[in-house]
Image (cartoon, coloured by chain):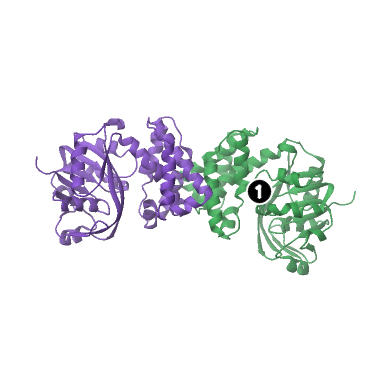
Chain colours: A purple, B green
Amino acid sequence: MDKRTYAILGTGALGGFYGAKLQKSGLEVHYLLKSDYQQVRENGLIIQSKDGDFTLPQVNAYNDVNKMPQCDVVIISLKTTQNQLLPDLLPPIVKNNGVVLVLQNGMDIEPEIAKIVDNVNIIGGLCFLCSNKVAPGHIHHLDYGQISLGAYASNYQSTGITKQMEEIASDFEKAGISIELLEDLLLARWKKLVWNIPYNGLSVILDGRTDELMTDIHTHQLVESLMREVVVGAKSTGRIIPESFIETMLDYTLKMKPYRTSMKIDFDEKRPLEVEAIFGNPLRKAELAGVNLQQIRCLYQQLKFLDMRNRS
Amino acid sequence: MDKRTYAILGTGALGGFYGAKLQKSGLEVHYLLKSDYQQVRENGLIIQSKDGDFTLPQVNAYNDVNKMPQCDVVIISLKTTQNQLLPDLLPPIVKNNGVVLVLQNGMDIEPEIAKIVDNVNIIGGLCFLCSNKVAPGHIHHLDYGQISLGAYASNYQSTGITKQMEEIASDFEKAGISIELLEDLLLARWKKLVWNIPYNGLSVILDGRTDELMTDIHTHQLVESLMREVVVGAKSTGRIIPESFIETMLDYTLKMKPYRTSMKIDFDEKRPLEVEAIFGNPLRKAELAGVNLQQIRCLYQQLKFLDMRNRS
Protein backbone atom coordinates (compact mmCIF):
# COMPACT_ATOMS: atom_id res chain seq x y z
CA MET A 1 0.00 0.00 0.00
CA ASP A 2 1.04 3.59 -0.61
CA LYS A 3 2.15 5.67 2.31
CA ARG A 4 -0.67 7.10 4.36
CA THR A 5 -1.51 10.79 3.93
CA TYR A 6 -2.22 13.04 6.91
CA ALA A 7 -4.30 16.15 7.47
CA ILE A 8 -3.72 18.38 10.49
CA LEU A 9 -6.76 20.29 11.73
CA GLY A 10 -5.20 22.93 13.92
CA THR A 11 -1.53 23.68 13.25
CA GLY A 12 -0.42 24.98 16.63
CA ALA A 13 2.06 23.88 19.28
CA LEU A 14 0.74 20.32 19.17
CA GLY A 15 -0.59 19.73 15.65
CA GLY A 16 2.27 21.64 14.07
CA PHE A 17 4.84 19.66 15.97
CA TYR A 18 3.47 16.19 15.18
CA GLY A 19 2.66 17.14 11.58
CA ALA A 20 6.18 18.40 10.98
CA LYS A 21 7.70 15.27 12.47
CA LEU A 22 5.57 13.09 10.19
CA GLN A 23 6.41 15.16 7.13
CA LYS A 24 10.12 15.08 7.96
CA SER A 25 9.94 11.29 8.04
CA GLY A 26 8.75 11.33 4.44
CA LEU A 27 4.97 11.36 4.70
CA GLU A 28 2.57 13.65 2.88
CA VAL A 29 1.00 16.10 5.33
CA HIS A 30 -1.63 18.80 4.74
CA TYR A 31 -2.03 21.57 7.29
CA LEU A 32 -5.09 23.68 8.02
CA LEU A 33 -4.15 27.10 9.39
CA LYS A 34 -5.93 30.28 10.31
CA SER A 35 -3.95 33.25 11.62
CA ASP A 36 -0.57 31.78 10.62
CA TYR A 37 -1.62 30.81 7.10
CA GLN A 38 0.24 33.49 5.13
CA GLN A 39 3.46 33.09 7.08
CA VAL A 40 3.50 29.28 6.88
CA ARG A 41 2.53 29.14 3.20
CA GLU A 42 5.46 31.38 2.35
CA ASN A 43 8.06 30.22 4.87
CA GLY A 44 7.04 26.79 6.11
CA LEU A 45 7.48 25.56 9.67
CA ILE A 46 10.35 26.00 12.10
CA ILE A 47 10.69 23.35 14.82
CA GLN A 48 13.01 24.05 17.67
CA SER A 49 13.19 20.81 19.62
CA LYS A 50 15.15 19.23 22.43
CA ASP A 51 15.46 16.24 20.03
CA GLY A 52 17.06 18.42 17.33
CA ASP A 53 15.96 21.57 15.49
CA PHE A 54 14.73 21.43 11.91
CA THR A 55 12.96 23.54 9.32
CA LEU A 56 10.43 22.59 6.66
CA PRO A 57 10.67 25.45 4.15
CA GLN A 58 7.77 24.09 2.11
CA VAL A 59 4.57 22.70 3.53
CA ASN A 60 1.07 22.10 2.17
CA ALA A 61 -0.70 24.97 3.88
CA TYR A 62 -4.43 25.76 3.58
CA ASN A 63 -6.79 28.29 5.02
CA ASP A 64 -9.87 26.56 3.63
CA VAL A 65 -10.72 22.97 4.31
CA ASN A 66 -12.51 22.69 0.96
CA LYS A 67 -9.21 23.12 -0.87
CA MET A 68 -7.59 20.23 1.01
CA PRO A 69 -7.44 16.69 -0.40
CA GLN A 70 -9.12 13.83 1.43
CA CYS A 71 -6.53 12.16 3.63
CA ASP A 72 -6.12 8.70 5.12
CA VAL A 73 -5.68 10.11 8.61
CA VAL A 74 -7.18 13.36 9.88
CA ILE A 75 -5.57 14.59 13.09
CA ILE A 76 -7.77 16.85 15.20
CA SER A 77 -5.41 19.08 17.10
CA LEU A 78 -7.66 22.06 17.71
CA LYS A 79 -8.47 22.97 21.29
CA THR A 80 -11.81 21.42 22.28
CA THR A 81 -13.16 24.95 22.69
CA GLN A 82 -13.25 25.11 18.88
CA ASN A 83 -15.03 21.82 18.35
CA GLN A 84 -18.19 23.59 17.26
CA LEU A 85 -16.31 24.03 13.95
CA LEU A 86 -15.88 20.30 13.34
CA PRO A 87 -19.19 19.69 11.50
CA ASP A 88 -17.85 22.06 8.82
CA LEU A 89 -14.20 21.05 8.92
CA LEU A 90 -14.26 17.28 9.11
CA PRO A 91 -16.57 15.87 6.41
CA PRO A 92 -14.75 17.35 3.38
CA ILE A 93 -11.38 15.79 4.20
CA VAL A 94 -12.24 12.42 5.73
CA LYS A 95 -11.90 9.35 3.52
CA ASN A 96 -14.41 6.54 3.59
CA ASN A 97 -12.92 3.99 6.01
CA GLY A 98 -10.24 6.53 6.92
CA VAL A 99 -9.04 7.38 10.38
CA VAL A 100 -9.84 10.37 12.57
CA LEU A 101 -7.20 10.75 15.26
CA VAL A 102 -8.41 12.91 18.14
CA LEU A 103 -5.44 14.47 19.93
CA GLN A 104 -7.50 16.42 22.44
CA ASN A 105 -7.90 16.66 26.19
CA GLY A 106 -10.82 15.53 28.24
CA MET A 107 -13.69 13.20 27.67
CA ASP A 108 -16.57 12.42 25.35
CA ILE A 109 -15.12 14.11 22.29
CA GLU A 110 -15.01 10.86 20.30
CA PRO A 111 -18.78 10.30 20.46
CA GLU A 112 -19.26 13.82 19.11
CA ILE A 113 -16.97 13.00 16.19
CA ALA A 114 -18.89 9.80 15.56
CA LYS A 115 -22.06 11.87 15.14
CA ILE A 116 -20.40 14.07 12.51
CA VAL A 117 -18.74 11.41 10.36
CA ASP A 118 -19.64 7.76 10.06
CA ASN A 119 -17.82 4.97 8.29
CA VAL A 120 -14.53 6.11 9.79
CA ASN A 121 -12.25 4.66 12.42
CA ILE A 122 -11.98 6.98 15.38
CA ILE A 123 -8.87 6.77 17.49
CA GLY A 124 -8.28 8.81 20.59
CA GLY A 125 -4.80 9.96 21.47
CA LEU A 126 -3.51 11.24 24.80
CA CYS A 127 -0.48 13.42 24.27
CA PHE A 128 2.22 13.91 26.86
CA LEU A 129 3.85 16.86 25.18
CA CYS A 130 5.43 20.06 26.38
CA SER A 131 5.46 22.43 23.45
CA ASN A 132 4.70 26.11 22.74
CA LYS A 133 4.10 28.17 19.66
CA VAL A 134 6.56 31.02 20.02
CA ALA A 135 5.74 32.84 16.74
CA PRO A 136 3.63 32.14 13.63
CA GLY A 137 4.89 28.83 12.20
CA HIS A 138 7.56 28.61 14.87
CA ILE A 139 7.16 25.87 17.45
CA HIS A 140 9.31 25.22 20.49
CA HIS A 141 9.22 21.59 21.68
CA LEU A 142 10.48 21.55 25.26
CA ASP A 143 9.99 18.03 26.49
CA TYR A 144 8.21 14.68 26.20
CA GLY A 145 6.08 13.91 23.15
CA GLN A 146 4.70 10.42 23.70
CA ILE A 147 1.18 9.60 22.53
CA SER A 148 -1.07 6.88 23.94
CA LEU A 149 -3.52 5.60 21.33
CA GLY A 150 -6.81 3.85 21.87
CA ALA A 151 -9.56 3.03 19.39
CA TYR A 152 -13.05 4.33 19.97
CA ALA A 153 -16.14 2.17 19.66
CA SER A 154 -19.72 3.10 20.49
CA ASN A 155 -20.14 3.98 24.19
CA TYR A 156 -16.41 3.61 24.71
CA GLN A 157 -16.52 -0.16 24.62
CA SER A 158 -13.05 -1.54 25.05
CA THR A 159 -11.75 -2.50 21.58
CA GLY A 160 -8.38 -4.07 22.18
CA ILE A 161 -5.64 -3.13 19.74
CA THR A 162 -6.83 -2.53 16.19
CA LYS A 163 -5.04 -2.69 12.85
CA GLN A 164 -5.45 1.07 12.37
CA MET A 165 -3.82 1.76 15.72
CA GLU A 166 -0.84 -0.34 14.72
CA GLU A 167 -0.51 1.37 11.34
CA ILE A 168 -0.56 4.83 12.88
CA ALA A 169 1.84 3.75 15.60
CA SER A 170 4.21 2.56 12.90
CA ASP A 171 4.09 5.93 11.10
CA PHE A 172 4.66 7.90 14.31
CA GLU A 173 7.45 5.68 15.53
CA LYS A 174 9.27 6.04 12.20
CA ALA A 175 8.90 9.78 12.73
CA GLY A 176 10.56 9.49 16.13
CA ILE A 177 7.43 9.76 18.24
CA SER A 178 7.05 7.22 21.01
CA ILE A 179 3.66 5.46 21.01
CA GLU A 180 1.81 3.39 23.56
CA LEU A 181 -1.15 1.26 22.43
CA LEU A 182 -4.16 1.07 24.73
CA GLU A 183 -6.81 -1.63 24.88
CA ASP A 184 -9.27 0.65 26.66
CA LEU A 185 -9.46 4.29 25.64
CA LEU A 186 -11.99 5.29 28.29
CA LEU A 187 -9.83 4.01 31.12
CA ALA A 188 -6.92 6.04 29.79
CA ARG A 189 -9.04 9.18 29.48
CA TRP A 190 -10.18 8.84 33.11
CA LYS A 191 -6.62 8.25 34.23
CA LYS A 192 -5.42 11.40 32.54
CA LEU A 193 -8.20 13.31 34.30
CA VAL A 194 -6.84 12.13 37.65
CA TRP A 195 -4.06 14.64 37.03
CA ASN A 196 -5.81 17.20 34.86
CA ILE A 197 -8.85 17.86 37.02
CA PRO A 198 -7.14 18.89 40.25
CA TYR A 199 -4.11 20.66 38.85
CA ASN A 200 -5.65 22.41 35.87
CA GLY A 201 -8.65 23.47 37.92
CA LEU A 202 -6.92 24.68 41.07
CA SER A 203 -4.06 26.35 39.19
CA VAL A 204 -6.62 28.69 37.60
CA ILE A 205 -8.93 29.14 40.59
CA LEU A 206 -6.15 29.75 43.12
CA ASP A 207 -3.55 31.22 40.76
CA GLY A 208 -1.10 28.57 41.90
CA ARG A 209 1.71 26.53 40.44
CA THR A 210 1.84 22.77 41.00
CA ASP A 211 4.54 23.09 43.66
CA GLU A 212 2.51 25.66 45.62
CA LEU A 213 -0.57 23.41 45.53
CA MET A 214 1.49 20.48 46.80
CA THR A 215 3.33 22.36 49.56
CA ASP A 216 0.20 23.70 51.25
CA ILE A 217 -1.33 20.94 53.35
CA HIS A 218 -4.91 22.01 52.59
CA THR A 219 -4.63 22.16 48.82
CA HIS A 220 -2.58 18.96 48.91
CA GLN A 221 -5.55 17.28 50.64
CA LEU A 222 -7.96 18.85 48.17
CA VAL A 223 -5.91 17.58 45.21
CA GLU A 224 -6.00 14.10 46.66
CA SER A 225 -9.71 14.29 47.36
CA LEU A 226 -10.40 15.45 43.79
CA MET A 227 -8.31 12.56 42.47
CA ARG A 228 -10.45 10.18 44.50
CA GLU A 229 -13.58 11.68 42.96
CA VAL A 230 -12.19 11.05 39.48
CA VAL A 231 -11.61 7.43 40.47
CA VAL A 232 -15.23 7.27 41.66
CA GLY A 233 -16.33 8.73 38.32
CA ALA A 234 -14.30 6.14 36.43
CA LYS A 235 -15.85 3.37 38.50
CA SER A 236 -19.35 4.66 37.72
CA THR A 237 -18.57 3.91 34.05
CA GLY A 238 -17.09 0.51 34.81
CA ARG A 239 -13.41 1.46 34.81
CA ILE A 240 -11.23 0.61 37.81
CA ILE A 241 -8.26 2.82 38.62
CA PRO A 242 -6.17 1.32 41.41
CA GLU A 243 -5.55 3.26 44.62
CA SER A 244 -1.82 3.15 43.91
CA PHE A 245 -2.31 5.30 40.82
CA ILE A 246 -3.23 8.28 43.01
CA GLU A 247 -0.03 7.88 45.02
CA THR A 248 1.92 7.66 41.78
CA MET A 249 0.41 10.89 40.44
CA LEU A 250 1.04 12.74 43.71
CA ASP A 251 4.67 11.57 43.87
CA TYR A 252 5.19 12.38 40.21
CA THR A 253 3.89 15.92 40.75
CA LEU A 254 5.95 16.44 43.89
CA LYS A 255 9.05 15.62 41.87
CA MET A 256 8.15 17.80 38.88
CA LYS A 257 9.70 21.18 38.34
CA PRO A 258 7.28 23.98 39.37
CA TYR A 259 4.78 23.94 36.55
CA ARG A 260 2.16 26.31 35.21
CA THR A 261 -0.62 24.10 33.81
CA SER A 262 -1.89 24.41 30.26
CA MET A 263 -5.26 25.64 31.51
CA LYS A 264 -3.52 28.34 33.54
CA ILE A 265 -1.55 29.40 30.47
CA ASP A 266 -4.80 29.59 28.49
CA PHE A 267 -6.33 31.64 31.30
CA ASP A 268 -3.39 34.04 31.51
CA GLU A 269 -3.52 34.47 27.71
CA LYS A 270 -7.27 35.16 27.97
CA ARG A 271 -8.04 32.17 25.75
CA PRO A 272 -11.18 30.09 26.37
CA LEU A 273 -10.67 27.27 28.86
CA GLU A 274 -11.39 23.62 28.06
CA VAL A 275 -13.82 23.44 30.99
CA GLU A 276 -16.46 21.34 29.26
CA ALA A 277 -14.08 18.68 27.91
CA ILE A 278 -12.11 18.31 31.12
CA PHE A 279 -14.78 18.97 33.78
CA GLY A 280 -18.28 19.17 32.31
CA ASN A 281 -18.22 15.97 30.24
CA PRO A 282 -16.89 13.66 32.96
CA LEU A 283 -19.35 15.20 35.44
CA ARG A 284 -22.26 14.52 33.13
CA LYS A 285 -21.00 11.02 32.35
CA ALA A 286 -20.90 10.13 36.04
CA GLU A 287 -24.26 11.80 36.59
CA LEU A 288 -25.80 9.60 33.91
CA ALA A 289 -24.51 6.66 35.93
CA GLY A 290 -26.19 8.10 39.02
CA VAL A 291 -23.05 9.51 40.68
CA ASN A 292 -22.65 13.13 41.77
CA LEU A 293 -19.01 14.27 41.85
CA GLN A 294 -19.53 17.19 44.19
CA GLN A 295 -16.07 18.68 44.51
CA ILE A 296 -15.45 18.42 40.78
CA ARG A 297 -18.79 20.16 40.27
CA CYS A 298 -17.68 22.92 42.62
CA LEU A 299 -14.52 23.46 40.54
CA TYR A 300 -16.53 23.27 37.32
CA GLN A 301 -18.86 26.04 38.43
CA GLN A 302 -16.01 28.20 39.70
CA LEU A 303 -14.14 27.76 36.41
CA LYS A 304 -17.20 28.58 34.30
CA PHE A 305 -17.51 31.87 36.22
CA LEU A 306 -13.81 32.72 35.89
CA ASP A 307 -13.63 31.74 32.22
CA MET A 308 -16.62 33.88 31.33
CA ARG A 309 -15.35 36.92 33.20
CA ASN A 310 -11.82 36.47 31.87
CA ARG A 311 -12.97 36.91 28.29
CA SER A 312 -15.66 39.58 28.74
CA MET B 1 -30.20 46.37 91.48
CA ASP B 2 -27.49 48.73 90.27
CA LYS B 3 -27.03 49.23 86.59
CA ARG B 4 -25.02 46.53 84.90
CA THR B 5 -21.40 47.33 83.96
CA TYR B 6 -19.96 46.34 80.60
CA ALA B 7 -16.49 45.44 79.31
CA ILE B 8 -15.69 45.52 75.60
CA LEU B 9 -12.96 43.13 74.46
CA GLY B 10 -12.07 44.52 71.06
CA THR B 11 -13.05 48.12 70.45
CA GLY B 12 -13.35 48.18 66.68
CA ALA B 13 -16.16 48.80 64.20
CA LEU B 14 -18.48 46.47 66.08
CA GLY B 15 -17.41 46.56 69.75
CA GLY B 16 -16.77 50.29 69.65
CA PHE B 17 -20.18 50.97 68.16
CA TYR B 18 -22.20 48.90 70.62
CA GLY B 19 -20.09 50.02 73.60
CA ALA B 20 -20.55 53.68 72.74
CA LYS B 21 -24.32 53.24 72.36
CA LEU B 22 -24.50 51.57 75.79
CA GLN B 23 -22.37 54.27 77.41
CA LYS B 24 -24.43 57.03 75.79
CA SER B 25 -27.55 55.49 77.34
CA GLY B 26 -25.99 55.96 80.77
CA LEU B 27 -24.23 52.67 81.46
CA GLU B 28 -20.68 52.22 82.70
CA VAL B 29 -18.52 50.76 79.93
CA HIS B 30 -14.83 49.75 79.97
CA TYR B 31 -13.00 49.36 76.67
CA LEU B 32 -9.95 47.25 75.91
CA LEU B 33 -7.90 48.71 73.07
CA LYS B 34 -4.61 47.98 71.39
CA SER B 35 -3.42 50.16 68.52
CA ASP B 36 -6.01 52.91 69.17
CA TYR B 37 -5.41 53.09 72.93
CA GLN B 38 -3.53 56.40 73.09
CA GLN B 39 -5.92 58.18 70.75
CA VAL B 40 -9.08 56.94 72.50
CA ARG B 41 -7.77 57.57 76.02
CA GLU B 42 -7.06 61.18 75.12
CA ASN B 43 -9.95 61.95 72.76
CA GLY B 44 -12.66 59.36 73.34
CA LEU B 45 -14.84 57.85 70.63
CA ILE B 46 -16.49 59.46 67.61
CA ILE B 47 -19.57 57.69 66.24
CA GLN B 48 -20.83 58.76 62.87
CA SER B 49 -24.16 56.96 62.45
CA LYS B 50 -27.13 56.92 60.18
CA ASP B 51 -29.18 57.06 63.43
CA GLY B 52 -27.42 60.28 64.48
CA ASP B 53 -23.76 61.22 65.07
CA PHE B 54 -22.36 61.59 68.58
CA THR B 55 -19.06 61.90 70.41
CA LEU B 56 -17.94 60.49 73.76
CA PRO B 57 -14.99 62.72 74.73
CA GLN B 58 -14.22 60.62 77.80
CA VAL B 59 -14.23 56.86 77.90
CA ASN B 60 -12.70 54.23 80.20
CA ALA B 61 -9.89 53.06 77.94
CA TYR B 62 -7.36 50.33 78.79
CA ASN B 63 -4.47 48.66 77.05
CA ASP B 64 -4.09 46.02 79.73
CA VAL B 65 -6.87 43.74 80.83
CA ASN B 66 -5.38 43.48 84.33
CA LYS B 67 -6.12 47.15 84.94
CA MET B 68 -9.80 46.73 84.08
CA PRO B 69 -12.47 46.17 86.74
CA GLN B 70 -14.54 42.99 86.73
CA CYS B 71 -17.77 43.71 84.87
CA ASP B 72 -21.25 42.21 84.90
CA VAL B 73 -21.20 41.67 81.15
CA VAL B 74 -18.09 41.05 79.05
CA ILE B 75 -18.67 41.56 75.33
CA ILE B 76 -16.27 39.65 73.08
CA SER B 77 -16.04 41.67 69.91
CA LEU B 78 -12.63 40.60 68.68
CA LYS B 79 -12.41 38.78 65.38
CA THR B 80 -12.36 35.01 65.97
CA THR B 81 -8.86 34.97 64.48
CA GLN B 82 -7.69 36.50 67.78
CA ASN B 83 -9.45 34.04 70.03
CA GLN B 84 -6.18 32.43 71.03
CA LEU B 85 -5.84 35.51 73.29
CA LEU B 86 -9.00 34.79 75.26
CA PRO B 87 -7.46 32.54 77.93
CA ASP B 88 -5.41 35.59 78.97
CA LEU B 89 -8.04 38.26 78.41
CA LEU B 90 -11.20 36.80 79.83
CA PRO B 91 -10.56 35.43 83.34
CA PRO B 92 -9.40 38.72 84.95
CA ILE B 93 -12.55 40.66 84.05
CA VAL B 94 -15.34 38.13 84.31
CA LYS B 95 -17.51 38.21 87.44
CA ASN B 96 -18.68 35.07 89.14
CA ASN B 97 -22.17 34.43 87.72
CA GLY B 98 -21.57 37.24 85.23
CA VAL B 99 -22.34 37.16 81.53
CA VAL B 100 -20.02 36.66 78.57
CA LEU B 101 -21.68 37.93 75.41
CA VAL B 102 -20.03 36.52 72.29
CA LEU B 103 -20.62 38.85 69.33
CA GLN B 104 -18.66 36.79 66.82
CA ASN B 105 -19.24 35.02 63.54
CA GLY B 106 -19.34 31.32 62.94
CA MET B 107 -19.76 28.32 65.10
CA ASP B 108 -18.42 26.57 68.18
CA ILE B 109 -16.90 29.62 69.81
CA GLU B 110 -19.15 29.36 72.86
CA PRO B 111 -17.86 25.91 73.89
CA GLU B 112 -14.31 27.33 73.72
CA ILE B 113 -15.34 30.14 76.06
CA ALA B 114 -16.95 27.63 78.40
CA LYS B 115 -13.58 25.87 78.70
CA ILE B 116 -11.84 29.11 79.67
CA VAL B 117 -14.30 30.43 82.25
CA ASP B 118 -16.85 28.50 84.25
CA ASN B 119 -19.60 29.73 86.52
CA VAL B 120 -20.62 32.33 83.91
CA ASN B 121 -23.61 32.64 81.66
CA ILE B 122 -22.56 32.52 78.04
CA ILE B 123 -24.79 34.21 75.51
CA GLY B 124 -24.19 34.18 71.79
CA GLY B 125 -25.13 37.16 69.69
CA LEU B 126 -25.54 37.36 65.93
CA CYS B 127 -25.02 40.90 64.74
CA PHE B 128 -26.56 42.32 61.61
CA LEU B 129 -24.45 45.43 61.47
CA CYS B 130 -22.83 47.42 58.72
CA SER B 131 -20.10 49.48 60.30
CA ASN B 132 -16.45 50.43 59.59
CA LYS B 133 -13.64 51.90 61.61
CA VAL B 134 -12.53 54.86 59.50
CA ALA B 135 -9.76 56.12 61.83
CA PRO B 136 -8.50 55.37 65.38
CA GLY B 137 -11.50 55.83 67.69
CA HIS B 138 -13.69 56.93 64.79
CA ILE B 139 -16.47 54.56 63.73
CA HIS B 140 -18.84 54.92 60.82
CA HIS B 141 -22.14 53.07 61.30
CA LEU B 142 -23.70 52.67 57.85
CA ASP B 143 -26.75 50.48 58.34
CA TYR B 144 -28.62 47.92 60.42
CA GLY B 145 -27.46 47.06 63.94
CA GLN B 146 -29.87 44.44 65.23
CA ILE B 147 -28.55 41.65 67.45
CA SER B 148 -30.13 38.21 67.88
CA LEU B 149 -29.35 36.76 71.30
CA GLY B 150 -29.37 33.14 72.36
CA ALA B 151 -28.08 31.55 75.57
CA TYR B 152 -25.48 28.81 75.38
CA ALA B 153 -25.73 25.58 77.31
CA SER B 154 -23.45 22.56 77.08
CA ASN B 155 -23.47 21.02 73.56
CA TYR B 156 -25.71 23.82 72.34
CA GLN B 157 -28.80 22.42 74.01
CA SER B 158 -31.72 24.67 73.35
CA THR B 159 -32.25 26.84 76.46
CA GLY B 160 -35.33 28.87 75.75
CA ILE B 161 -35.22 32.50 76.83
CA THR B 162 -33.21 33.15 79.99
CA LYS B 163 -33.32 35.94 82.57
CA GLN B 164 -29.84 37.13 81.52
CA MET B 165 -30.94 37.39 77.89
CA GLU B 166 -33.87 39.56 78.92
CA GLU B 167 -31.71 41.81 81.09
CA ILE B 168 -29.18 42.39 78.33
CA ALA B 169 -31.95 42.92 75.81
CA SER B 170 -33.37 45.58 78.07
CA ASP B 171 -30.02 47.42 78.29
CA PHE B 172 -29.49 47.29 74.54
CA GLU B 173 -33.01 48.35 73.70
CA LYS B 174 -32.73 51.38 76.01
CA ALA B 175 -29.54 52.20 74.09
CA GLY B 176 -31.46 52.11 70.82
CA ILE B 177 -30.29 48.70 69.62
CA SER B 178 -32.96 46.38 68.32
CA ILE B 179 -32.81 42.89 69.88
CA GLU B 180 -34.32 39.55 68.94
CA LEU B 181 -34.39 36.75 71.53
CA LEU B 182 -33.71 33.21 70.35
CA GLU B 183 -34.75 29.98 71.98
CA ASP B 184 -32.14 27.99 70.09
CA LEU B 185 -28.72 29.54 69.51
CA LEU B 186 -27.35 26.68 67.42
CA LEU B 187 -30.20 26.89 64.93
CA ALA B 188 -29.56 30.61 64.53
CA ARG B 189 -25.82 30.07 64.03
CA TRP B 190 -26.50 27.50 61.28
CA LYS B 191 -29.00 29.82 59.64
CA LYS B 192 -26.51 32.64 59.52
CA LEU B 193 -24.02 30.27 57.88
CA VAL B 194 -26.53 29.61 55.09
CA TRP B 195 -25.61 33.10 53.90
CA ASN B 196 -22.05 33.42 55.17
CA ILE B 197 -20.59 30.21 53.78
CA PRO B 198 -21.39 30.69 50.10
CA TYR B 199 -20.99 34.44 49.82
CA ASN B 200 -18.02 35.00 52.10
CA GLY B 201 -16.22 32.01 50.62
CA LEU B 202 -16.85 32.60 46.93
CA SER B 203 -16.33 36.36 47.15
CA VAL B 204 -12.73 35.71 48.23
CA ILE B 205 -12.01 32.69 46.02
CA LEU B 206 -13.49 34.19 42.85
CA ASP B 207 -12.89 37.87 43.65
CA GLY B 208 -16.59 38.52 43.11
CA ARG B 209 -19.28 40.76 44.53
CA THR B 210 -22.63 39.29 45.56
CA ASP B 211 -24.34 40.57 42.40
CA GLU B 212 -21.71 38.96 40.14
CA LEU B 213 -22.09 35.63 41.93
CA MET B 214 -25.87 35.80 41.50
CA THR B 215 -25.87 36.87 37.84
CA ASP B 216 -23.68 34.03 36.60
CA ILE B 217 -25.79 30.90 36.30
CA HIS B 218 -22.98 28.60 37.43
CA THR B 219 -22.03 30.43 40.60
CA HIS B 220 -25.73 30.97 41.33
CA GLN B 221 -26.14 27.18 41.26
CA LEU B 222 -23.03 26.73 43.38
CA VAL B 223 -24.33 29.21 45.98
CA GLU B 224 -27.59 27.30 46.17
CA SER B 225 -25.82 23.97 46.42
CA LEU B 226 -23.60 25.27 49.24
CA MET B 227 -26.68 26.55 51.07
CA ARG B 228 -28.18 23.07 50.81
CA GLU B 229 -25.02 21.61 52.34
CA VAL B 230 -25.33 23.99 55.29
CA VAL B 231 -28.91 22.77 55.76
CA VAL B 232 -27.60 19.19 55.71
CA GLY B 233 -24.99 20.16 58.30
CA ALA B 234 -27.65 21.71 60.51
CA LYS B 235 -29.75 18.59 60.23
CA SER B 236 -26.79 16.42 61.26
CA THR B 237 -26.86 18.31 64.58
CA GLY B 238 -30.61 18.03 64.95
CA ARG B 239 -31.60 21.47 63.64
CA ILE B 240 -34.12 21.77 60.83
CA ILE B 241 -33.89 24.72 58.44
CA PRO B 242 -36.87 24.76 56.09
CA GLU B 243 -36.35 24.66 52.32
CA SER B 244 -38.07 28.05 52.04
CA PHE B 245 -35.22 29.69 53.99
CA ILE B 246 -32.85 29.07 51.06
CA GLU B 247 -35.24 30.78 48.67
CA THR B 248 -35.54 33.68 51.10
CA MET B 249 -31.76 34.10 51.31
CA LEU B 250 -31.36 33.94 47.52
CA ASP B 251 -34.12 36.49 46.95
CA TYR B 252 -32.75 38.74 49.68
CA THR B 253 -29.30 38.69 48.07
CA LEU B 254 -30.66 39.29 44.58
CA LYS B 255 -32.32 42.45 45.89
CA MET B 256 -29.30 43.70 47.85
CA LYS B 257 -27.06 46.42 46.52
CA PRO B 258 -23.80 44.95 45.09
CA TYR B 259 -21.92 44.00 48.21
CA ARG B 260 -18.33 43.21 49.09
CA THR B 261 -18.50 40.67 51.91
CA SER B 262 -16.72 41.17 55.22
CA MET B 263 -14.38 38.27 54.48
CA LYS B 264 -13.48 39.86 51.15
CA ILE B 265 -12.75 43.14 52.90
CA ASP B 266 -10.51 41.30 55.37
CA PHE B 267 -8.78 39.59 52.47
CA ASP B 268 -8.25 42.82 50.55
CA GLU B 269 -6.84 44.42 53.72
CA LYS B 270 -4.53 41.40 54.16
CA ARG B 271 -6.10 40.62 57.53
CA PRO B 272 -6.49 37.00 58.64
CA LEU B 273 -9.73 35.39 57.49
CA GLU B 274 -12.24 33.79 59.87
CA VAL B 275 -11.98 30.51 58.00
CA GLU B 276 -12.03 28.26 61.04
CA ALA B 277 -15.05 29.85 62.73
CA ILE B 278 -17.14 30.06 59.56
CA PHE B 279 -15.98 26.96 57.63
CA GLY B 280 -13.75 24.71 59.73
CA ASN B 281 -15.92 24.45 62.85
CA PRO B 282 -19.21 23.62 61.09
CA LEU B 283 -17.35 21.11 58.89
CA ARG B 284 -15.94 19.35 61.94
CA LYS B 285 -19.28 19.51 63.76
CA ALA B 286 -21.03 17.75 60.87
CA GLU B 287 -18.15 15.29 60.54
CA LEU B 288 -18.56 14.31 64.18
CA ALA B 289 -22.17 13.53 63.32
CA GLY B 290 -20.94 11.37 60.43
CA VAL B 291 -21.71 13.81 57.61
CA ASN B 292 -19.13 14.99 55.06
CA LEU B 293 -19.95 18.43 53.61
CA GLN B 294 -17.85 18.06 50.49
CA GLN B 295 -18.35 21.36 48.72
CA ILE B 296 -17.91 23.34 51.93
CA ARG B 297 -14.72 21.35 52.51
CA CYS B 298 -13.54 22.30 49.03
CA LEU B 299 -14.08 26.00 49.82
CA TYR B 300 -12.43 25.58 53.24
CA GLN B 301 -9.27 24.15 51.71
CA GLN B 302 -9.16 26.79 48.99
CA LEU B 303 -9.58 29.56 51.57
CA LYS B 304 -6.89 28.16 53.85
CA PHE B 305 -4.47 28.26 50.90
CA LEU B 306 -5.46 31.80 49.89
CA ASP B 307 -5.42 33.13 53.46
CA MET B 308 -1.96 31.75 54.12
CA ARG B 309 -0.50 33.12 50.89
CA ASN B 310 -2.23 36.46 51.34
CA ARG B 311 -0.37 37.12 54.58
CA SER B 312 3.04 35.65 53.77
Q: Nearer the viewer, residue A62 or B246?
A: A62
Q: Amino acid at mark 1?
A: Asn
Secondary structure under badge 1?
loop
Horizontally, is B70 left or right of B247 in the view?
A: right
Q: Is residue B120 visible?
A: yes
- Image check: B47 left or right of A45? right
Asked if residue A175 lies left or right of residue B302, the reply is left
Residue A9 image offset from top left, x and y in percent: 22, 48
Instruction: Classify B76 as above or below A162.
Output: below
Residue B245 place in picture, x, y as percent? 60, 38
Query: Does residue B254 show up?
Result: no
Figure disc tally: 1
Name which residue lies at 71% across and 47% down: B147
Query: Farthest residue toward the left?
Result: A1
Query: Which residue was labeled with disc 1?
Result: B105
| Depth check, front residue: B203 or B50 | B203
* Residue most extreme to the right: B1
Nearer to us in this view, B172 or B62: B62
Q: Position of residue A265 (x, y in %)?
A: 37, 55
